[in-house]
Image (cartoon, rainbow, N blue to C red):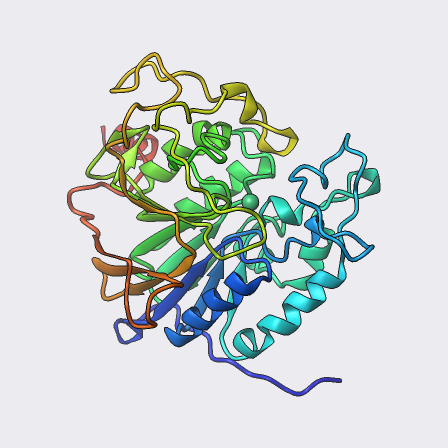
Amino acid sequence: MSTIYHFKTMPISSPKSYPKRIAIVGDLGLTYNTTSTINHLTGNNPDLVLLVGDVTYANLYLTNGTGSDCYSCSFPDTPIHETYQPRWDYWGRYMQPLVSKIPIMVLEGNHEIEEQAENQTFAAYRSRFAFPSKESGSSSQLYYSFNAGGIHFIMLGGYVAYNKSDDQYKWLEKDLANVDRTVTPWLVATWHPPWYSTYTAHYREAECMKVAMEELLYEYGVDLVFNGHVHAYERSNRVYNYTLDPCGLVHITVGDGGNREKMAIEHADEPGKCPEPSSTPDKFMGGFCAYNFTSGPAAGNFCWDQQPEYSAYRESSFGHGILEVKNETHALWTWHRNQDMYNKAGDIIYVVRQPEKCPIKPKKQMMGDKAKRD
Ligand SMILES: [Fe+2]
């Protein structure tokens, strides 16, 4: 019924597959800023687009043609439950020139929850994209994995149960154990709400997910994490448990796609900008876990009093990023601001893997191996 389109997927792994360019973007919506982001992104000639949640913001538009600025309007126990579905079509039509030529992989954000009667959630999101869940052994469309260009991508759900006894966690354990680092040396994990963001907006909101999953991702040597949700850019140093760690993960927030909500500007470490801890959780975040720090420079407090050492670079500008894996150990990350010329980068960093220095097998498994040998 439509024109036939085609695109080329990246090879799973081959030295010849390097370097390929993966565009990573979050919190797009459809605004003047979004169109600038997508123009810049298209100009960077990606081979794959990764959208880390918050797709159309349909839930912030009402059926009478107006918009809603009430962030929690789409959540239960509020009078308004409208989510204007034609926005999904507008967005699809707008993105067609790009995503009919280049593959896009998507994970869900809070704006995709769109809760309906009988607790039905993510209905529009699930029906408009294809997810390789079965192929990756997952029983849910809301978390899955895939391989492309020497990278094993793990797409996690920040709004789906993630504790040790939950399906998502068990699936993640299995998925990580099955990664063959000779085929995909790079391990990239993505989910929507960041763990290491220093902005006041959504500060430590996903702490329960961090408490549940950080150790597992660290033990398996995940190299990079990409998140959205916070409408700004931030890149961390290698960090684990809020402490600098040479084998820790690099966390990058690219929630700066340009949607209709405000940009995040204030930092939690500025005077008077540390949010109330009780303001952090909501129904879909899986409870409250963000207590005052018990050690480190911010011990006894909920926020640092200066930019935390784990925060390497932060800036409130709209934009997108390009991940370019050069070989088994080196990947180039560039972040591009919308207000800059197409070939200019706002942040450039080489991420270097050191598998010989950082063991990639989990401690438990290593202990098991040792026991076998003994
Ligand atoms: Fe979000």
Quadrant in which ligand 1 is drawn:
top right
Residue appearing at x 47%, y 43% in the figure: 230
Residue appearing at x 32%, y 28% in the figure: 241
Name the spot of residue 52 as percent of width and height, x first.
50, 53
In the image: residue 80, left or right of residue 23: right
Name the spot of residue 4 as percent of width and height, x first.
64, 87
Which corner quadrant of the image does residue 246 belong to?
top left
Which corner quadrant of the image does residue 77 belong to?
top right
Q: Residue furthest bottom?
A: 3
Whether 334 is drawn above or below 243: the answer is: below
Residue appearing at x 70%, y 49% in the figure: 59
Name the spot of residue 367 as percent of width and height, x first.
28, 29
Please state, as top left, top right, bottom left or bottom right, where the N terminus lies in the image: bottom right
Q: Observer-nearest residue: 55 or 219?
A: 55
Whether 102 is drawn above or below 91: the answer is: below
Residue appearing at x 41%, y 59% in the figure: 319
Q: Observer-nearest residue: 135 or 374?
A: 135
Name the spot of residue 215 as percent of width and height, x first.
37, 32
| Total tally of numbered discs in the picture | 0
Please state, as top left, top right, bottom left or bottom right, where the C terminus lies in the image: top left
